Image (cartoon, rainbow, N blue to C red):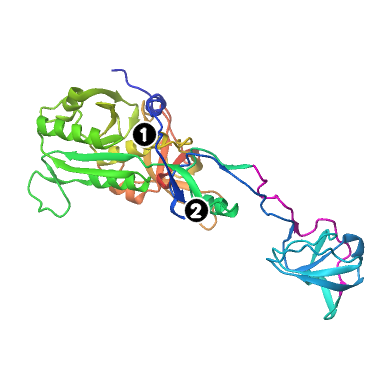
Amino acid sequence: MQMLSFDQALTQLVKKAVPTRRTQTLAVGEALGYVLAQPVISGMDVPPHDNSQMDGYALHSFDSSHDRELNISQRITAGDRGDTPLETGTAARIFTGAPIPPDANAVVMQENAEMIDDARIRIKQDTVKAGENIRRKGEDIAKGATILNVGHRLRPQDLGLIASIGQAEVTVYVPLKIATFTTGDELLAPGEDWAPGKIYNANHSVIQAMMQKWGFELIDLGRIPDDLKATRQTLQKASEQADVVITTGGVSVGEEDHLKPAVEALGHLDLWRVKMKPGKPLAFGYVNDTPFIGLPGNPVSAFATCYLFARAFLLRSQGVQDVFIKPYWVTADFDWPQAGFRREFARAQLVSGPQDTETKVVLYPQQGSGVLTSTVWGEGFVVIEEDTTVTKGDTVAFLPFDAFQ
């Protein structure tokens, strides 16, 4: 099979994602991390009325010449109706968020007014402009405006925005169910006694945590023996319970690699060789009608392909529209003298000194696909394009790990 470029493989995978149609209604306070299935449309203006940006005095700009004395005709606090018209030639004592009374068109901050007595002030600033220190009705959100679209994954600030229009509930997509399991007689679970020839299974914990971090429902089918019948039975069970099945390793052609024939017995499997490092092998197919993603077995390769490929497929299947990671452009504080034919994703960390005017990026010294320490030390991937070298001072793309969130 022809080796695909990174962009070709990612495009193909995302095109195969079918967005879920299952929805539910949640209280706004319970909807963090969920994806909107219906747009949020404001039924009101925000703010709902003209209001004061600060504590001060509401007046008409025509009455505000420097050193002019004005009687205080009313007092308006946040929460008042503010519907009493302002008497001509007077000012209203007003507080932050309070409605602007009819016939007033500006607010003088209290620092620019001098109290003569309890009922009179003197304006100290030279001129007052109409509209000064007033938040206009609908300035933030206009009634009827769409404030959040379908496919948007809800963040804390989004929930605040929804609450600001008085909406108590949102319609969201039901989280996908992701099934995962472990194959490999050499693998041990954390806590088991180590023995010669055995290794502890890091991939299972990494993939589980990613699924939970992205807001999916995890179905952990545990560890199964290196046996074709057991592998096939577990895949059948996974396809019946989950929306997507994800595994690591076991899709090569070795005698003990039973995952590939088991998937093909129940559905079909595409094995892509992707021009990337780490993470060249990537499998996609279907177990019955359930999508299957087979990630590489090396720990960093599994981490990278889950981050760079599986994430986009899963989020699009969850209904998210914007699934591609946006890079930061930073300055390389390293040399990469050897150009390769594959796109490389080097584990990297951002640095800046007290005299630096720009953010720089450095690489972990060991970039092997088995060095999981590099992903803990690193803050993201530096992208080294195909057939490209990098010299210290060049601008490079940086993909932050916090895109996981």
Answer whether residue 61 is magenta in the image. Answer: no
Tell me the residue at 84%/56% (across/down).
130
Q: Which mark is residue 376?
A: none
Left or right placement of residue 79 versus residue 352 in this view:
right
Mark 1 element type? helix
Residue 345, picture quadrant: top left
Q: Name the residue beneath numbered marker 2.
A: 156
Answer whether residue 133 is magenta in the image. Answer: yes
Where residue 307 sits in the image (x, y, percent)? Answer: 36, 39
From this viewpoint, is residue 337 visible?
no
The amino acid type found where label 2 is placed reads Pro
From this viewpoint, is residue 60 visible?
yes
The amino acid type found where label 1 is placed reads Phe
Rendered-image quadrant of the N terminus? top left
User: Which region shows up in magenta?
Assistant: 121-144
Comparing labels 2 and 1, the label whose residue is closer to the camera: 2
Between 122 and 103, the residue placed more toward the observer is 103
Question: Are discs 2 and 1 less than 8 Å apart at CB?
Answer: no
* Label 2 crowd (10 A; few <14 / some 14-19 / many >=20): few
Mostly what secondary structure, the magenta segment? loop
| Mark 2 or mark 1, earlier in chain | 2
Mark 2 element type? helix
Q: Which mark is residue 309?
A: 1
